[in-house]
Amino acid sequence: MNSAIRSTRKYTFKKPDLFKLRELGSRVTSPKDFQAHHGRLLSILQTKVEEGVLNTLVQFYDPLYHYFLFPDYILFPTLEEYFDLVGLPVSNEVPFYGLEPIPKASTIAAALHLETTELKTKLTIKGGLQCLPTHFLFQKKPPFLPN
């Protein structure tokens, strides 16, 4: 990995008042039923966050590709990891282990409802991985969404 010196920026974070949300969470009459349907969302309200952690972590965040780029590795949570954190199973899906063959451009294009030629022009290699810039994906409107 490139160990170039990163420029640091000063960020300020809003501190939302979670009192009312926590109070609402305490009114859930059946926490076990709530957890069965929504995972560990209520317990996330009780999570303590260290003050300086977000300020430090955000310095390594790449907003274009939505991952954290550290000097020796890239960190990006997968959907399976988010589901595990929240406590919900990935329904009817086999977890992605990273040992699968790299998908062809035509397969990716079909999954995203794009033309293969358009996709090939946007594919880039970053960190040795084939990827699409997030801004390109955000510009594309999924065909299943209403106008």
Image (spheres, rainbow, N blue to C red):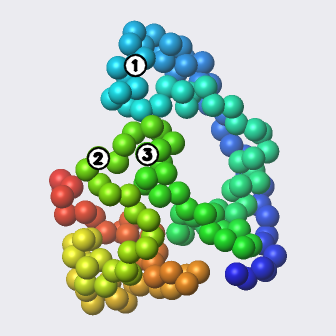
100 over 89 or under it: above or below: below
Q: Residue at x 47, y 48 (%)?
A: 82
Q: Disc 1 versus disc 3: distance between alpha carbons?
A: 18 Å
Q: Disc 2 versus disc 3: distance between alpha carbons?
A: 10 Å
90 over 108 or under it: above or below: above
- Mark 3 — residue? 83
Drawn side of residue 106 relative to residue 29, left or right: left
- Image x and y of residue 15, in percent: 67, 33
Residue type at the position of mark 2: Ser
Q: Callout 2: helix, strand or loop?
A: loop
User: In front here: 24 or 138?
Assistant: 24
Structural crowding at the residue carrying mark 3, measured as other residues with C-alpha within 10 Å and reported as few (<14), some (14–19) or many (≥20): some
Residue type at the position of mark 1: Lys
User: Which quadrant of the figure contains the C terminus?
Assistant: bottom left
Q: Residue at x 67, y 71 (%)?
A: 73
- Mark 2 — residue? 91
User: In front here: 55 or 11?
Assistant: 55
**Total numbered badges shown on the rendered structure:** 3
Q: Earlier in the sequence, mark 2 or mark 1?
A: 1
Give the quadrant of residue 140: bottom left
User: In front here: 54 or 76?
Assistant: 76
Q: Which mark is residue 32?
A: 1
- Image x and y of residue 4, in percent: 78, 80
Q: Callout 3: helix, strand or loop?
A: helix
Give the quadrant of residue 144: bottom left
- Image x and y of residue 91, in percent: 29, 46
